[in-house]
Protein backbone atom coordinates (compact mmCIF):
# COMPACT_ATOMS: atom_id res chain seq x y z
CA UNK A 1 0.00 0.00 0.00
CA UNK A 2 1.55 3.33 -1.00
CA UNK A 3 2.33 6.28 1.29
CA UNK A 4 -0.64 8.30 0.04
CA UNK A 5 -3.26 5.68 0.77
CA UNK A 6 -1.70 4.69 4.12
CA UNK A 7 -1.57 8.29 5.32
CA UNK A 8 -5.20 8.94 4.48
CA UNK A 9 -6.34 5.70 6.12
CA UNK A 10 -4.64 6.64 9.37
CA UNK A 11 -5.89 10.22 9.26
CA UNK A 12 -9.40 8.97 8.61
CA UNK A 13 -9.35 6.52 11.50
CA UNK A 14 -8.19 9.00 14.14
CA UNK A 15 -11.68 10.29 14.78
CA UNK A 16 -12.58 6.93 16.30
CA UNK A 17 -9.19 6.34 17.93
CA UNK A 18 -8.89 9.53 19.93
CA UNK A 19 -11.98 9.44 22.07
CA UNK A 20 -11.08 9.19 25.74
CA UNK A 21 -13.02 7.14 28.26
CA UNK A 22 -15.84 8.59 30.31
CA UNK A 23 -17.14 10.91 27.62
CA UNK A 24 -20.76 9.82 27.64
CA UNK A 25 -21.84 13.03 25.89
CA UNK A 26 -19.73 12.01 22.86
CA UNK A 27 -20.67 8.32 22.57
CA UNK A 28 -23.32 8.87 19.91
CA UNK A 29 -21.04 11.13 17.91
CA UNK A 30 -18.22 8.59 18.19
CA UNK A 31 -20.46 5.71 17.08
CA UNK A 32 -21.69 7.64 14.04
CA UNK A 33 -18.15 8.64 13.15
CA UNK A 34 -16.90 5.06 13.31
CA UNK A 35 -19.57 3.98 10.80
CA UNK A 36 -18.59 6.69 8.34
CA UNK A 37 -14.87 6.12 8.79
CA UNK A 38 -15.21 2.36 8.23
CA UNK A 39 -16.66 3.08 4.79
CA UNK A 40 -13.93 5.64 4.24
CA UNK A 41 -11.25 3.04 5.03
CA UNK A 42 -12.72 0.65 2.49
CA UNK A 43 -12.77 3.48 -0.04
CA UNK A 44 -9.06 4.12 0.42
CA UNK A 45 -8.06 0.45 0.43
CA UNK A 46 -9.01 -0.29 -3.16
CA UNK A 47 -6.80 0.14 -6.20
CA UNK A 48 -7.29 3.14 -8.52
CA UNK A 49 -10.30 2.11 -10.55
CA UNK A 50 -13.95 2.77 -11.08
CA UNK A 51 -14.50 1.07 -7.72
CA UNK A 52 -12.68 3.91 -5.96
CA UNK A 53 -14.94 6.47 -7.60
CA UNK A 54 -18.02 4.47 -6.63
CA UNK A 55 -16.90 3.95 -3.03
CA UNK A 56 -15.83 7.57 -2.64
CA UNK A 57 -19.31 8.69 -3.59
CA UNK A 58 -20.78 6.10 -1.21
CA UNK A 59 -18.60 7.39 1.65
CA UNK A 60 -19.64 10.97 0.95
CA UNK A 61 -23.34 10.04 0.76
CA UNK A 62 -23.04 8.24 4.10
CA UNK A 63 -21.36 11.27 5.65
CA UNK A 64 -24.24 13.43 4.44
CA UNK A 65 -26.79 11.07 6.01
CA UNK A 66 -24.83 10.75 9.27
CA UNK A 67 -23.63 14.30 9.88
CA UNK A 68 -25.96 16.29 7.65
CA UNK A 69 -25.51 18.06 4.34
CA UNK A 70 -24.26 21.26 5.98
CA UNK A 71 -21.94 19.84 8.66
CA UNK A 72 -18.24 20.69 8.35
CA UNK A 73 -17.36 17.03 8.98
CA UNK A 74 -19.12 16.17 5.74
CA UNK A 75 -17.04 18.78 3.95
CA UNK A 76 -13.86 17.47 5.61
CA UNK A 77 -14.73 13.99 4.36
CA UNK A 78 -15.32 15.29 0.83
CA UNK A 79 -11.94 17.06 0.79
CA UNK A 80 -10.08 13.95 1.92
CA UNK A 81 -11.88 11.80 -0.62
CA UNK A 82 -11.06 14.37 -3.29
CA UNK A 83 -7.44 14.29 -2.19
CA UNK A 84 -7.42 10.50 -2.53
CA UNK A 85 -8.89 10.67 -6.02
CA UNK A 86 -6.39 13.34 -7.04
CA UNK A 87 -3.59 11.18 -5.71
CA UNK A 88 -4.67 8.26 -7.89
CA UNK A 89 -5.06 10.35 -11.04
CA UNK A 90 -8.87 10.41 -11.08
CA UNK A 91 -9.16 14.17 -11.19
CA UNK A 92 -12.50 14.43 -12.97
CA UNK A 93 -14.16 12.33 -10.25
CA UNK A 94 -12.58 14.54 -7.56
CA UNK A 95 -14.08 17.78 -8.92
CA UNK A 96 -17.73 17.28 -7.81
CA UNK A 97 -16.71 16.09 -4.33
CA UNK A 98 -14.48 19.11 -3.80
CA UNK A 99 -17.14 21.47 -5.15
CA UNK A 100 -19.56 19.94 -2.63
CA UNK A 101 -17.07 20.62 0.16
CA UNK A 102 -16.73 24.25 -0.87
CA UNK A 103 -20.49 24.68 -0.89
CA UNK A 104 -20.66 23.35 2.68
CA UNK A 105 -17.87 25.38 4.24
CA UNK A 106 -18.79 28.87 5.32
CA UNK A 107 -16.10 30.97 3.68
CA UNK A 108 -16.68 33.91 6.02
CA UNK A 109 -16.26 31.78 9.14
CA UNK A 110 -12.80 32.29 10.63
CA UNK A 111 -12.67 28.65 11.76
CA UNK A 112 -13.32 27.18 8.32
CA UNK A 113 -11.38 29.67 6.20
CA UNK A 114 -8.17 27.64 6.18
CA UNK A 115 -9.97 24.36 5.42
CA UNK A 116 -11.97 26.15 2.72
CA UNK A 117 -8.69 27.26 1.14
CA UNK A 118 -7.29 23.74 1.29
CA UNK A 119 -10.41 22.52 -0.51
CA UNK A 120 -9.82 25.18 -3.15
CA UNK A 121 -6.25 23.94 -3.53
CA UNK A 122 -7.39 20.34 -4.06
CA UNK A 123 -10.04 21.56 -6.51
CA UNK A 124 -7.34 23.43 -8.41
CA UNK A 125 -5.26 20.26 -8.58
CA UNK A 126 -8.30 18.33 -9.82
CA UNK A 127 -9.05 20.91 -12.53
CA UNK A 128 -5.40 20.87 -13.57
CA UNK A 129 -5.47 17.08 -13.85
CA UNK A 130 -8.64 17.37 -15.91
CA UNK A 131 -6.81 19.88 -18.16
CA UNK A 132 -9.04 22.80 -17.24
CA UNK A 133 -6.26 25.35 -16.82
CA UNK A 134 -8.46 28.43 -16.36
CA UNK A 135 -10.48 26.88 -13.52
CA UNK A 136 -7.30 25.45 -11.99
CA UNK A 137 -5.55 28.82 -11.89
CA UNK A 138 -8.61 30.53 -10.39
CA UNK A 139 -8.96 27.96 -7.59
CA UNK A 140 -5.23 27.79 -6.84
CA UNK A 141 -4.88 31.58 -6.76
CA UNK A 142 -7.78 31.89 -4.32
CA UNK A 143 -6.21 29.15 -2.18
CA UNK A 144 -2.77 30.74 -2.23
CA UNK A 145 -4.13 34.10 -1.05
CA UNK A 146 -5.37 32.51 2.18
CA UNK A 147 -2.80 29.78 2.65
CA UNK A 148 0.39 31.76 2.10
CA UNK A 149 0.15 33.97 5.24
CA UNK A 150 -1.37 31.23 7.39
CA UNK A 151 1.12 28.52 6.49
CA UNK A 152 3.92 31.01 7.09
CA UNK A 153 2.43 31.67 10.55
CA UNK A 154 2.50 27.93 11.21
CA UNK A 155 6.13 27.57 10.00
CA UNK A 156 5.07 25.65 6.92
CA UNK A 157 5.90 26.67 3.35
CA UNK A 158 3.73 27.15 0.30
CA UNK A 159 6.00 25.64 -2.32
CA UNK A 160 3.45 22.92 -3.12
CA UNK A 161 0.87 25.55 -4.11
CA UNK A 162 3.37 27.52 -6.18
CA UNK A 163 4.36 24.30 -7.95
CA UNK A 164 0.71 23.57 -8.72
CA UNK A 165 0.26 27.11 -10.06
CA UNK A 166 3.42 26.80 -12.13
CA UNK A 167 2.12 23.57 -13.63
CA UNK A 168 -1.31 25.05 -14.39
CA UNK A 169 -0.37 28.52 -15.65
CA UNK A 170 3.36 29.07 -15.59
CA UNK A 171 5.35 31.86 -13.98
CA UNK A 172 2.66 34.42 -14.77
CA UNK A 173 0.10 32.56 -12.65
CA UNK A 174 2.56 32.30 -9.75
CA UNK A 175 3.38 36.01 -9.94
CA UNK A 176 -0.30 36.98 -10.03
CA UNK A 177 -1.04 34.82 -6.99
CA UNK A 178 1.87 36.31 -5.04
CA UNK A 179 0.60 39.79 -5.85
CA UNK A 180 -2.91 38.86 -4.74
CA UNK A 181 -1.58 37.47 -1.46
CA UNK A 182 0.67 40.44 -0.67
CA UNK A 183 -0.47 42.22 2.46
CA UNK A 184 -3.05 39.59 3.37
CA UNK A 185 -3.10 39.07 7.12
CA UNK A 186 -3.06 35.67 8.75
CA UNK A 187 -6.03 34.51 10.81
CA UNK A 188 -5.98 35.50 14.45
CA UNK A 189 -6.63 32.39 16.49
CA UNK A 190 -5.72 31.40 20.03
CA UNK A 191 -3.84 28.12 20.02
CA UNK A 192 -4.70 25.66 22.82
CA UNK A 193 -2.02 25.05 25.45
CA UNK A 194 -0.66 21.47 25.43
CA UNK A 195 -0.24 19.62 28.72
CA UNK A 196 1.28 16.51 27.11
CA UNK A 197 3.34 16.46 23.89
CA UNK A 198 4.45 13.25 22.20
CA UNK A 199 7.22 13.75 19.60
CA UNK A 200 6.67 12.11 16.20
CA UNK A 201 8.63 9.02 15.24
CA UNK A 202 10.76 9.33 12.13
CA UNK A 203 9.33 6.73 9.71
CA UNK A 204 11.66 3.73 9.42
CA UNK A 205 10.89 3.45 5.71
CA UNK A 206 12.52 6.85 5.18
CA UNK A 207 15.56 6.45 7.45
CA UNK A 208 17.85 5.50 4.58
CA UNK A 209 16.95 8.64 2.65
CA UNK A 210 17.48 10.98 5.65
CA UNK A 211 15.20 13.81 4.50
CA UNK A 212 13.56 16.64 6.40
CA UNK A 213 9.90 17.55 6.16
CA UNK A 214 6.76 18.87 7.83
CA UNK A 215 3.07 18.01 8.07
CA UNK A 216 0.25 20.50 8.62
CA UNK A 217 -2.59 19.00 10.66
CA UNK A 218 -6.10 20.16 11.45
CA UNK A 219 -7.75 18.87 14.63
CA UNK A 220 -10.42 19.44 17.26
CA UNK A 221 -10.53 18.63 20.97
CA UNK A 222 -12.77 16.55 23.17
CA UNK A 223 -14.10 18.34 26.28
CA UNK A 224 -11.36 16.71 28.40
CA UNK A 225 -8.56 18.07 26.20
CA UNK A 226 -8.02 14.90 24.17
CA UNK A 227 -7.49 15.18 20.42
CA UNK A 228 -10.13 14.26 17.85
CA UNK A 229 -10.80 14.66 14.12
CA UNK A 230 -7.18 14.76 12.96
CA UNK A 231 -6.77 15.48 9.25
CA UNK A 232 -3.69 16.09 7.12
CA UNK A 233 -4.08 19.45 5.37
CA UNK A 234 -0.70 19.59 3.65
CA UNK A 235 2.73 18.00 3.83
CA UNK A 236 6.21 18.34 2.42
CA UNK A 237 7.26 15.92 1.01
CA UNK A 238 3.80 14.61 0.17
CA UNK A 239 2.68 11.37 1.83
CA UNK A 240 5.91 10.59 3.67
CA UNK A 241 5.48 11.81 7.25
CA UNK A 242 1.66 12.03 7.38
CA UNK A 243 1.09 8.92 9.48
CA UNK A 244 3.83 9.62 12.04
CA UNK A 245 2.71 13.22 12.55
CA UNK A 246 -0.95 12.36 12.98
CA UNK A 247 -0.21 9.42 15.28
CA UNK A 248 1.86 11.67 17.52
CA UNK A 249 -0.76 14.43 17.66
CA UNK A 250 -3.60 12.05 18.55
CA UNK A 251 -1.70 11.24 21.78
CA UNK A 252 -1.32 14.87 22.83
CA UNK A 253 -3.43 16.38 25.57
CA UNK A 254 -4.42 20.02 25.98
CA UNK A 255 -5.95 22.21 28.64
CA UNK A 256 -9.71 21.74 28.64
CA UNK A 257 -11.01 23.79 25.71
CA UNK A 258 -13.58 26.56 26.01
CA UNK A 259 -15.13 25.27 22.76
CA UNK A 260 -14.69 21.64 21.77
CA UNK A 261 -15.96 22.39 18.26
CA UNK A 262 -13.20 24.83 17.37
CA UNK A 263 -10.67 23.75 14.75
CA UNK A 264 -6.96 24.20 15.34
CA UNK A 265 -3.91 23.72 13.15
CA UNK A 266 -0.44 22.50 13.99
CA UNK A 267 2.69 22.09 11.89
CA UNK A 268 4.85 19.09 12.88
CA UNK A 269 8.48 19.16 11.72
CA UNK A 270 10.71 16.17 10.94
CA UNK A 271 14.48 16.47 11.20
CA UNK A 272 16.53 13.70 9.63
CA UNK A 273 19.28 14.37 12.18
Image: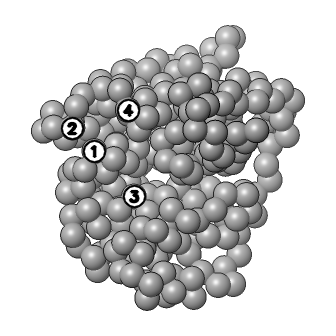
Which residue corresponds to the image point at 29% horizontal and 67% vertical from the top-left?
128
Q: Earlier in the sequence, mark 1 or mark 3?
A: 1
Few, some or many residues within 10 Å of mark 2 (<14, 14–19, 20+): some
Q: Earlier in the sequence, mark 1 or mark 4?
A: 4
Q: Nearer the viewer, residue 258 or 147?
A: 147
Quickly name the residue at label 1. 88
Q: In the image as oriented, which residue stretches furthest toward the top?
A: 22
Question: Helix, strand, or loop for circle 4?
Answer: loop
Q: Which mark is residue 26?
A: none
Q: Earlier in the sequence, mark 2 or mark 4?
A: 4
* Residue 81 visible in the current orientation: yes
Quickly name the residue at label 4. 2
Q: Which mark is residue 48?
A: 2
Q: Earlier in the sequence, mark 2 or mark 1?
A: 2
Count of number-bearing discs: 4
Cβ atoms under marks 2 and 1 closer than 8 Å = yes
Amino acid sequence: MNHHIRSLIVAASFTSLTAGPGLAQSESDLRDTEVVQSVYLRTLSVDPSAALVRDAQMAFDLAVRTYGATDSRTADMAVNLGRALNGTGQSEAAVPLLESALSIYNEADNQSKLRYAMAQYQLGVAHSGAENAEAAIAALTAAYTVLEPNLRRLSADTSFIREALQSAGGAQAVSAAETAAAGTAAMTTVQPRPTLQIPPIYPPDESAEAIDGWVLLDYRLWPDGGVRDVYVLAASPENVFDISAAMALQQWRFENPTSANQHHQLSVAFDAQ
